[in-house]
Amino acid sequence: MTVSTSWVTPQYILAERRNTVLEAIDQRIPAVVQSIVLSYLPQPRWYSILENINALPHSVPPFTRKMEQILDTECPIYGAPHKIADTFNLYLFPVGQVTNGRINTLIELMQYCKLDQINIPSPLLASKISHPNINQLKGPRWFLISKQWLPNSENKTREEQMATIQRLCKTSRLHFAAPLIRDALAATSLEISATGQGLWLTPASSIDRESMVTTRVQECIVTKQAPAKRSIQFLNDITVGTLVERIPHVKTIIHNSAHPRVGMAVVLHFSDETEDPSPNASCCAVS
């Protein structure tokens, strides 16, 4: 695939993929046979998801050689024969002008995914929350998020989960991070639109609503309660998951607590231009 340094259309990426396949086909094969081979070339999953909800951006960051190499790398979490393309889902986060309108906010993306209900605590949606990772979206971008929790990350404290991610970064020399709330919610919404299910689900969670599993995200939230004479602040972690009714669900839990249904998914960044995977919590203050 040709490496482009400027933004391109999603259709351009598909054409480049088609050209790559053509280059690999023996040119002595009749053209009609080549055409048949190309007709069976499936559309990339990220493209099909956005096409089905009429949310293909008009232009996107290029799909570079580095991204191809990462997808083809042996998965440092599960090892051979698994590649990163097998254990992570690739999504294109659509922001701005899309096939049928515009997407400017996370809520608008979730509505494009035709979700019947959105279960997010109102404080996280309040305009007075200034944290850019919740209400302010940058342009379209690629991101990879794990299909499952990190192994054995459930029933661990936030500190233990973040330490696991840091070790993974060092041993793999790849840029792993805990997901931001916008990435976790975007991935969950896009996955529901594609499969009818969210991410990180266990067999039990498809039967028992109370068995829903969630992932911690990078952000924390500071809440305030005002008893009779003094105000008390509480620091809580934010988790994201999916209810069996196809509802993205955001909850808060006690900061740095361990819970059997709260593991840690992981995002793999393609470059250092994205957020720093710091183990330090970024916080949102809510009155």
Image (cartoon, grey):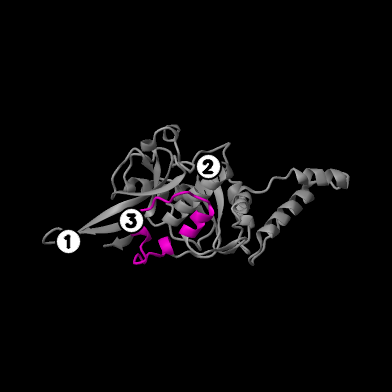
Q: Secondary structure at mark 1?
A: loop
Residue neighbourhood size for the residue with mark 1, other residues' Cα within 10 Å, grouped as few (<14), some (14–19), many (≥20):
few
Residue for badge 3: 220
Q: Secondary structure at mark 3?
A: strand
Of circles 2 and 3, the one toward us is 2
Horizontal and vertical percent position of residue 12: 70, 59
Name which residue type carries label 1: Ser
Q: Earlier in the sequence, mark 2 or mark 1?
A: 2
- Between the C-alphas of marks 2 and 1, the distance is 43 Å
Q: Earlier in the sequence, mark 3 or mark 1?
A: 3
Judge left or right: residue 256 versus residue 231.
right
Which stretch did the figure color magenta? Answer: 107-135
Q: Quadrant of residue 280?
A: bottom left
Residue for badge 1: 231
Q: Quadrant of residue 131?
A: bottom left
Of circles 2 and 1, the one toward us is 2
- Between the C-alphas of marks 3 and 1, the distance is 19 Å
- Between the C-alphas of marks 2 and 3, the distance is 28 Å
**Which numbered circle lies on residue 196?**
2
Name which residue type carries label 3: Cys
Q: Residue visible at 77% across and 45% down?
A: 39
Q: Earlier in the sequence, mark 2 or mark 3?
A: 2
